[in-house]
Amino acid sequence: MPFITKDRREIIDAGGMPDAIEQGDLCYFYYAKMVRAWAACPRWRTAHAIRLAMHTERPECPVSVLEGREYCYEPYLSTARQLAWEVFFQFYVLPYEIQKREENGDVH
């Protein structure tokens, strides 16, 4: 669930992490990166690059304060990143694809 409270978002956006870490904090961290990449280039190739990185790169630990804590290890990081992807895909990529289908026609 990347839609955490604004005060938690501000801490994470500033490079920190709330003292009492919740799974949504990690999901927000990854989701915000995806949304920012999409805002810079809202194209299928951006979605492809994000998804490809999920398969080829180890998820980064958001901040050094997490190192050594359970949330900085698998499966916490990959699960948060996967859930962030699923929300991102539904809110950003799928509407883009629907628009392209309307512009270019469906595949039969």
Image (cartoon, grey):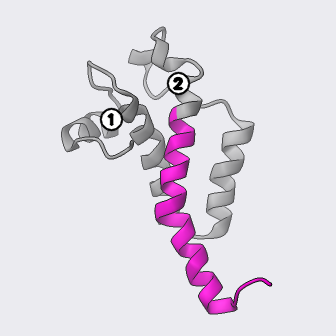
Q: Residue at x 62, y 91 (%)?
A: 103
Q: Quadrant of the C terminus?
A: bottom right
10 Å crowding of disc 2: few (<14), some (14-19), many (20+): some
> Which mark is on residue 12?
1
SS label for mark 2:
helix
In the picture as drawn, the residue positioned furthest to the right comes out as 108
10 Å crowding of disc 1: few (<14), some (14-19), many (20+): some
Q: Is residue 99 magenta?
A: yes
User: In the rendering, at what x and y percent does residue 100 appear?
Assistant: 62, 82
What span is colored magenta in the figure? Answer: 80-108
Q: Residue at x 69, y 90 (%)?
A: 105
Observer-side mark, 2 or 1, equals 2
Q: Is residue 45 left or right of residue 74?
A: right
- Answer yes or no: is residue 41 visible: no
User: In the rendering, at what x and y percent does residue 11 appear?
Assistant: 26, 34
Report which quarter residue 77 is drawn in.
top right
Q: Is residue 87 above or below residue 2?
A: below
Q: Quadrant of the N terminus?
A: top left
Which is nearer the eye, 70 or 1? 1
Report which quarter residue 89 is drawn in.
bottom right
User: In the rendering, at what x and y percent does residue 45 appear?
Assistant: 68, 65
Q: Are marks 2 and 1 in contact (CB under 8 Å)?
A: no
* Most common SS among magenta residues: helix
The three-letter amino acid code for the residue at tag 1 is: Ile
User: Of callouts 2 and 1, which one flags the residue occurring earlier in the amino acid sequence?
Assistant: 1
Q: Which residue is mark 2?
A: 76
